[in-house]
Image: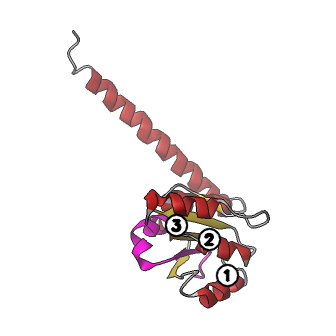
Amino acid sequence: MNPRVSIIMGSTSDLAIMEKAAKVLDDMGIPFEMNALSAHRTPAEVEAFAKQAAERGIEVIIAGAGMAAHLPGVIAAMTPVPVIGVPINASLNGMDALLAITQMPPGIPVATVAINGAMNAGILAVQILAVGDQELKEKMIHFKESLKKKIVDANKELAAVKYNFKTN
């Protein structure tokens, strides 16, 4: 099956973060691809990837990068496909990457998640795809309900814990 989402990282050292997006996509049954491309070390390959993504059937791109973090913006400049940026904490607590990804010029948007927030990037990619896919929309509804259930169940556990404390 052809990939619908492309996960791109600036370096394979970002894999531990970016695989969280891959897990979400895999759990939702969405075919994806993963590659390492660098805006600074492989600019020609980044350009070819970005310009060919739409015609290859890629519907959303998740791009993670640390430090200067130009990768998501460079890709967004060359493709009509929505790009979700994941700032990676490689230096300066990830603030450099966060600012580089969010401060895009007018006309070149990059949706941005939290520092190291690849899981949310995967979820956002699913939500984007679910706009035109009822089955995915149902999966997202069930996923959100499972989040609610975790909190409800946790509150039941906390209620039991608070009674174990002695009051003075």
Relative to 38, residue 28 above or below: above
Q: Secondary structure at mark 3?
A: helix
**Which amino acid type is marked by label 2?**
Pro
Taking the image as shown, residue 132 lies to the left or right of residue 143, namely right
Taking the image as shown, residue 92 lies to the left or right of residue 159, namely right
Q: Which residue is mark 2?
A: 72
Q: Are marks 1 and 2 in contact (CB under 8 Å)?
A: no
Q: Secondary structure at mark 1?
A: helix
Q: Whole-percent x and y of residue 150? A: 42, 41
Q: Which residue is mark 3?
A: 25
Q: Whole-percent x and y of residue 5? A: 60, 73
Identify the image quadrant of the C terminus.
Answer: top left
Q: Residues within 10 Å of mark 2 (few under 14, many from 20)?
A: many
Q: Which residue is mark 1?
A: 50
Q: Nearer the viewer, mark 3 or mark 1?
A: 1
Q: Which residues are magenta?
A: 1-23
Q: Nearer the viewer, residue 73 or 96?
A: 96
Taking the image as shown, residue 19 lies to the left or right of residue 136, namely left
Work out how far the residue at label 3 is from the one at label 1, CA to CA, in angstroms: 20 Å
Whether the magenta-drawn stretch holds residue 21 is answered as yes
Whether the magenta-drawn stretch holds residue 152 is answered as no
Q: Secondary structure at mark 2?
A: helix
